[in-house]
Amino acid sequence: MTDIEIAQSVQLKHINHIASMLGIASEELEHYGKYKAKLPLHLIDEGKLAKSKLILVSAISPTPAGEGKTTMSIGLNEGLRKLGKASIAVLREPSLGPVFGLKGGATGGGKAQVLPMEDINLHFTGDFSAIEKAHNLLSAIIDNNIQSKTNTLNIDARTVKWKRVLDVNDRALRQIVVGLGGTTMGVPRETGFDITAASEIMAILCLSNNLSDLKTRLGNIFIGFTYDKQAIYAKDLKANGAMAALLKDAVQPNLVQTIEGNPALIHGGPFANIAQGTNTVIATKMGMSLADYVVTEAGFGFDLGGEKFLNIKCQSADLKPEVIVLTATIRALKYHGGTSLAELHKPDSVAVKNGLPNLEKHLENALKFKVTPIIAINQFTADTEEEMEVVKQFAQQKGIRFAVANVWANGGDGAIELAEEVIQVLKTSTKEDFKPLYQWNQPVEEKIELICKQIYGAAYVEYSAKAKSDLKRITQLGLEQLPICMAKTQKSFSDDDTLRGRPTDFTLSIREIEIASGAGFIIPIAGNMMRMPGLPAHPAAEQIDIDANGNIVGLF
């Protein structure tokens, strides 16, 4: 059975029942039909956060073969609940870009999924739409102010960096010109579109503590400069109030269920290669208020999502994870060992061994934060005992805990071994073990180089003339104290996506540096990284359909 067939075979429980498992009365819910609901922010109890155990699920460098962090996160949560632990999965919302593009959805797979799968992968509760509308409202207000002869801030249109967003992969919109057609149509200027997951509004939603904090952060969005070189922010345009109003429902976490009928929270969906790649602070704190164990994920490999989770989100919200589950697959290790995509189904213990340096580097990175990692092999049917033994022996040599998890086929039952390893780590770990890689008050270039050299393994960091100019602007605006959110290919430790495994002695090139002062971070853009993906030659959208009875097919 396909993922969607498995999901559609499950008899869903009413969301009131799911809420009752967390001690939440149905009157507290804002219902979106029978199987989805939003939770009020007053359910967050700061006093309970210190007692709840935060578990981060990350992975080795992504490959076309897939690694399955979301599947692993859901399966681990099910395994913990089977062992009698009060656990909840707290995950990100899918973007329509990957759903209709190449990667597919983000609701897990097989018997480790969150439901209703179709709704979550498509419009869900409208959070992405609200973010898109709030972002584009600011875009419209900016262009209106540039056009206006009375309500004007004297904005220099050439300095405006704020683009528009759309939740679909559309390379034709990366660079456009607006305002054509005459004096009544606006002032012509170059701009473009980013994908909604890359919007600063998305990042702000994910890092805000409450609605008031959200509105303040929206006001701090940097727009550009006036003709006399004065910085302009969204609050100067009086835009943040209306933007916050559009996000009043989106700020609330979404409650859904797993295939095994357990509660899960899904909220926010930034990409880790162009943003911070983790779900919302609000949802994480909500989960920690409602459960003893919280299983959460960070996008792409540990070098991207994991690093940003620990250096940005955890420092911002004073969160301290106590264990890191590093997901790997045998076929991904073979890919990093030099095997072609077409040959990954063939047993090859030598290729697995050759791919271990990628895993090794991610483990080294995790240990830099003083958090205990566990290697979790996401098992596939083609994996052989000999191949898995290669990884097990590697783990033993390194003194790292190791578990095989067959969560796609067996759900929670397939994660018992992994759940037991996690519980053992949590018996001795403490929140005070966690140490970030850098302090926010370090110089900007120093923070960038720490990430590039210590996490990626670069020998040198090279700044373009544009990037050097951007560094001066950051100093001019007094934003040196912000953390770093690198925009880099997820396919390699380097900025060259063809370099698999563990590249060494490379130079990482910083092309430019964007400012996300509302979200509260700085975005160095490495290599050819773009914030609006394109569709493949045969996008997944070609396979998605709906029948006369409203049944959706083709999602994966």
Image: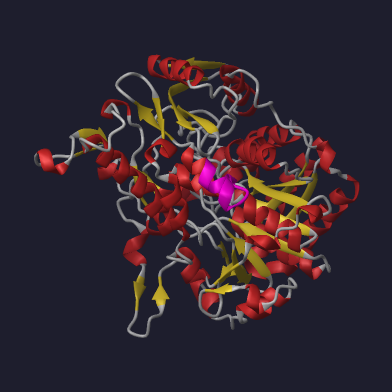
Q: Residue 125, image x and y in percent?
A: 48, 66
Furthest-front residue in this view: 150
Q: Quadrant of residue 442?
A: top right
Q: Is residue 467 left or right of residue 171?
A: right
Asked if the stretch drawn in magenta spans residue 244, the answer is no
Q: Is residue 155 above or below residue 91?
A: above
Q: Residue 167, image x and y in percent?
A: 38, 53
Tell me the residue at 65%/46% (across/down).
58
Q: Which residues are magenta?
A: 206-216
Q: Is residue 486 above or below residue 99?
A: above
Q: Is residue 555 above or below residue 404?
A: below
Can residue 409 be seen? yes
Q: Is residue 313 left or right of residue 274?
A: right
Tell me the residue at 45%/54% (across/down).
103
| Display colour scheme | secondary structure
The secondary structure that dominates the magenta segment is helix
* Closer to us: 546 or 539: 546
Tell me the residue at 39%/14% (across/down).
465
Q: Residue 237, image x and y in percent?
A: 37, 39
Q: Residue 338, image x and y in percent?
A: 53, 37
Can residue 299 be seen? no
Q: Is residue 3 left or right of residue 372?
A: left
Furthest-bottom residue in this view: 549
Q: How many marks?
A: 0
Tell me the residue at 75%/45% (across/down).
321
Asked if the stretch drawn in magenta spans residue 212, the answer is yes
Furthest-right residue in this view: 428
Q: Quadrant of residue 529?
A: top left
